[in-house]
Image: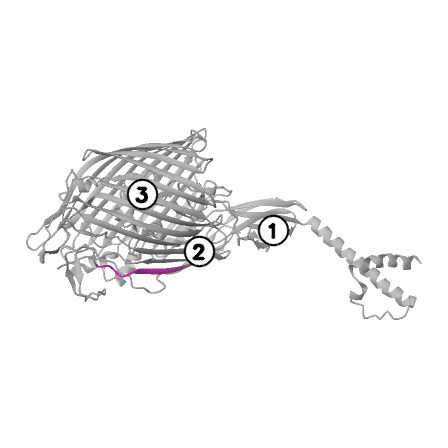
Amino acid sequence: MRFQREPKVFGAFLEKIWPVNNFPFRLFKLKGSGNRLKSGIWRICWLRGLCVLGLLYVHTITAKSGAEITGTVLNDQSSEPVLNVEVQLAGRSERTRSDGAGRFTIGNLPSGDYVIQASAAGYFSINREFHLEPSQTVQLEVALTPDHLQHWDSVSVNSSLLFNKTDENSLGGFTLAGSDVKNLGTVLADDPLRALQAVPGVTSNNDFEARFSVHGADPDRVGIYLDGIQLHQAIHTLEGTATSGSNSIFNSDVTDRLSLYDDAPPVQFGNNSAGAVDVGMRDGNPDKYLFRATANFAYAGFMAEGPLRVATPCSWIAAFRKSYLQYVLQQEMTDPAMSFGFQDVQGRFTCKVNSNNTLTLELIDGNTGIDLSRIRAQLGSNSLMTSDQTLNLGNLGWQYVHNGDLLVNTHVAWSRDSFANVNPMSAPLGSGDYNEWTWNTSATWMWNEKDPLNVGISARRIHDAGYLTQYNSQSPLQILNQYGGAATLTSGFIDQGWTGLNGRLHVTVGGRWDRNSLDAISVVSPQAGLTLRLPFSTQLQLGWGQYAQFPEVAQLTSTLGRRGLLPIRTTHTTAAIERRLTERVRVRATFYNRQDRDLLYQPFLDPRLINGAVFVPPPNPLYENSLRGYSRGFEFLVQRSTVKGLMGWVSYAYGRTMMRDGATGDTFPSDFDQRHTVTSYLSYRIRPTVNLSSRWTYGSGYPLPAFLSVKEPYTLSWASPYLLGDQRNQLRLPAYQRLDIRVSKSWTRSKWKKTLYAEVINLENRDNYRFDSLDGY
């Protein structure tokens, strides 16, 4: 009786959770009401119930005895969750991927010590040690650092980096950092300055050049700064030659950021008239040693970083690279002047003396050269056979922080740039030696919560001397240019912000004072900016400023110049309206107008027709402040800045840059006038260790910088009947277009990471031309 009664009670419970008709033994036909058959069936059901309870009990015991880890993967620059990151336990098979919110879970783990490893393409891999107790759940927050920034193992929240904005009132501010610098620098060159060529507002139709134009201005009018120090020379190139290529001195492995200001640059960037580039060198890892070896089509390099053991709060980073592209170009290029090579070494030491004081020391040593002695017999008397250029820089910095409301930065730097060129007869074609000492101090005082006061002073002592020669059949030696002298440039700046309308309005007013001792000219440059936050996530920005750029010592003391030459003066007026479609997507339209005057120009340098007769230029045409003009246009940008899914931008720019020569009365487009420019950069991580990116650039073409005409129809051909004309820059090069596709694949282990970069440059196989020179007429 007891045996029959208990199954009936348990059977009622079983029938609810597992009906008898669904039981595998339902082949028994319950026809009739025999107690024997019923008793057998219920006996099976009772045993089945014990099995189910046993399985539930075993599962409960396992769940209670097993531990798990949960966590979130974040980008340490913007605190944004990172999806599709591979998370695994070192030495074990358990692994998973982060979801769209950056979350991950690994469960059913026994107690013990573990090392979790998170890795993704474009980021440093990270290892975290932890201990699990039985039935414990450990929550982790994993911070991934882009693999071209300083490596941290913790999250640093900085919401201002959503769209890489560099300054609230700097309308042209656009910052590149992390994998964008690597993707846009190309595998062939791996050059941070080439990465800026994809930024809206920039034009560059010369694949051999690292320099670029901003709104139709000459590249020499764009100042380049390294951690507060303006550089005289920022590229590897061959000085004193008309045709060459270039590569920047910046190594992407140690570059922290690149910020371009192409509209009304901030007040602290002086002695430039068209724009400014701010480059930052990153600190080394203060906790552990890291090493990186690089080899690509152009050069090989090595980077190392780590703590400085003699002083606990100190770190260092150093990188070396040497090019071998010149050996390839010597076999493939018809122009031997392009086959130059370079090598450089650079490093940074950082010591946090205490909570208020930090010391830094940056060192750069570079060399650029060419040796065409193997084809000596093919070179003329004015051809370059050997060239040697050296560049040295030392920058000592001190940062002081007081009570969180005062920040003072001081830099003392020395730099040198020299070159020597020799012809096939071992006779000099030219040489130069540039030396500079720089001191500057800037301070930011947060006298209230929203409106900082920025002030700064600086002094630059410059020495420069050199010459250029050529050899003619009529005269054995002719001096083309000779210069030598010294100058002291002193300056100061101040700007003050003001916030009103409950934080919706922000106004900045400031100015600069600059003086050059060589020509005894002083200039004052006022500036102002306004940001107004409108409804519907929209903001309006207005900017206005005047800027001055002094002539080089080599121009003021040249046989082609004089000490009375004036500084270039420009006035920037710009307006921008921006709408945030989402937190990560923005649409921006910018309108600009730049007025230029007192530009240095050689009015009688080029041959031309005047009243139907050929004008023969003098052998040494002089520099004059005879050029003035304007640059006007607009830019349209759509950008998605995220670490999840597709990111990048698409931009279109229209510009018109016109010049007028006061000495001759000629009116013509700027040498870098390009009416239409389209740039697209897209990047997508298709797998945790695989990233795909593309860059497409279109430019409607630069003018041919000469007084030329041609019979219609005009087609670019070496056999075309080019004729001297009476108007400058009337013919243009064909449209420039280039599409690059790049993929990177990473392999990560517990102590090392290997990344393979593959790239197809100029996928459409476009023929793009650049103007070389006008050799005769």
Q: Residues within 10 Å of mark 3 (few under 14, many from 20)?
A: many
Residue 735 on the magenta span: yes
* Kind of residue at badge 2: Ser
Taking 70 as reference, is 60 left or right? right
Residue 433 position within the rendered picture, expressed as x and y whole percent measured from the top left: 21, 42
Q: Which mark is residue 683?
A: 2
Taking 553 as reference, is 759 left or right? right
The answer to whether one can see residue 574 in this image is yes
Q: Earlier in the sequence, mark 1 or mark 3?
A: 1
Colour pattern of the rendering: one colour
Label 1, label 3: how many angstroms apart (C-alpha)? 53 Å
Tell me: residue 202, above or below residue 43.
above
Mark 2 element type = strand
Q: Nearer the viewer, residue 712 or 177?
A: 712
The answer to whether one can see residue 252 in this image is no
Mark 1 element type = strand
Mark 3 element type = strand
What's drawn in magenta, residue-wise? 731-741
In this view, the residue farthest toward the left is 474
* Kind of residue at badge 3: Thr
Question: Mark 3, mark 2: which one is toward the viewer?
Answer: 3
Taking 552 as reference, is 763 left or right? right
Tell me: residue 494, above or below residue 533.
above
In the rendered image, the quadrant that contains the N terminus is: bottom right
In the rendered image, the quadrant that contains the C terminus is: bottom left
Q: Residues within 10 Å of mark 2 (few under 14, many from 20)?
A: many
Residue denoted by label 3: 573
Q: Nearer the viewer, residue 47 or 764?
A: 764
* Kind of residue at badge 1: Thr
Residue denoted by label 1: 105
Q: Residues within 10 Å of mark 1 (few under 14, many from 20)?
A: some
